[in-house]
Amino acid sequence: MRPQDIIRKKRDGAELSQVEIEFFVRGVTSGEVADYQSAALLMAIFLNGMTDAEQSALTDAMLRSGKILDFSDIPKPTVDKHSTGGVGDKTSLLIAPFAAAAGACEPMISGRGLGHTGGTLDKLESIPGYRVNLSLDEFRVVLDRCGFAMNGQTAEIAPADRKLYALRDATSTIEAIPLIVASIISKKCAAGLDAMVIDVKTGSGAFMREHDRARELARALVKTGKSLGVNSQALITDMNQPLGQAVGNSIEVLECIELLRGEVSDGAKPVLDLSIELAARMLVLAKLESSIDAARDRIKHVHESGAALETFRQNVEAQGGDPRVCDEPRKILPLTENSFKVESPRSGFVVKVDTQEIGHALAEAGGGRVRVEDKIDPRVGFIGEVKIGDQVRAGDSIGRVFCSDHEQGTRAAERIQAAYHLGEEPPESLDLIKEVVE
């Protein structure tokens, strides 16, 4: 069997066998398959797609290219959530302590931000001392102690994905749904999950802007997760505007801690609502509750009682962070008072938001990264004060950009002002949760 024979077969639109896929993935992991051969197969998959059987085989082979974690000795169901990413999408910081406080075990392997999207690891690292590069042994210790642990992908987990992801980025094959599915599910299943909820974003700030494409991805993710023994469900949720008010690493952590403390503003409430819904569905999938209503009540109880906040505090301390962030977040987090008002240029109703542009504006100001190696200023951020459907007058505040550099802050404010589109009539209201895919 030769790599070029497998490439030719997929190039010509034929279905690859499980043996052929396993051979190729082993070669990618070992280095016996050259990068240019891997790139050729990725493009063939991008152009011709994969059958359900091929997609499952590819995901399974990538999963088994590294170590599969085993938490079967922990007497709790193992659950996790994955989001396809967006602007202001910070629900992981709430869902993890919610689920852990409600009796689940959540080994969360997260990613960093790139382009217009924020990364959970970058947000957590804005807490002084917080470590996201735990060894697998340290990861288990934190999981045992707190019920959840937050970590980056280690070299032992799905190494084939690490190689193929870099090539996908370099060869413009990122958008291929079979490759997205294999990448996501291989990493998540490597954590030894019993159940998983997937948050697939759609809208102006999402990776899959069109609802039909988001649905296609959601269905593929759920089907593949189930084929590998993980009880899976997906929600398609709105990303036509930032989720909550805060966008930026430190201020997103601040917003989440305030929510955990019960300090719920109208602007931040969608973050809490979506987090409760996703966490509740995890409990049902993990068979900790038999109905979604009972699961929602259980999550609301651990929130309102303060149990979730205490679970978060335990995790921060266990991962080397300063636990005082739960008591005095504005004193502990790196924040700046240097802000720039984003004014409405005229009167009208907010009818549309170019959410991706907000993410790019903050990334350019130092709050995100364009390349993996870029450093982030956690103080850079934006607090939005209006939502789609709100009425504003000329000169009203749309929000404030926080940035220590005057030139960068001014530029970001100008870009964000242009991202808000005004009309004469209010638009139709947006549903936060658009569809459930089972």
Image: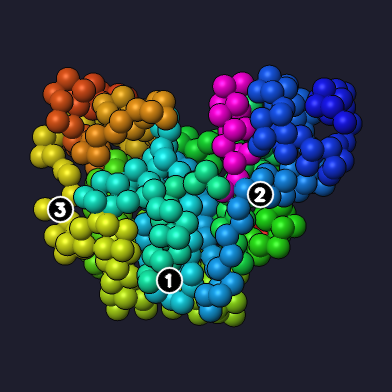
Q: Quadrant of residue 114?
A: top left
Residue identified by numbered label 3: 332
Q: Is residue 100 above or below residue 192?
A: below
- Residue 387: x and y, percent? 33, 44
Task: Name the residue located 76 percent from the left edge and 48 percent from the top edge.
Answer: 56
- Residue 424: x and y, percent? 36, 33
339 vs 26, left or right, is left
Q: Earlier in the sequence, mark 1 or mark 2?
A: 2
Mark 3 Cα-neighbour bin, 10 Å: few <14, some 14–19, many ≥20 = some
**Quarter that holds the C terminus:** bottom right
**Quarter that holds the N terminus:** top right
Q: Quadrant of residue 285?
A: bottom right
Residue identified by numbered label 1: 144
- Residue 191: x and y, percent? 56, 58
Q: Quadrant of residue 70?
A: bottom right
Amino acid type assigned to the residue bearing label 2 in the image: Leu
Amino acid type assigned to the residue bearing label 1 in the image: Asp
Q: Is residue 367 above or below residue 193?
A: above
- Residue 355: x and y, percent? 40, 34
Quote the CA–CA distance across marks 1 and 3.
26 Å
Residue identified by numbered label 2: 63
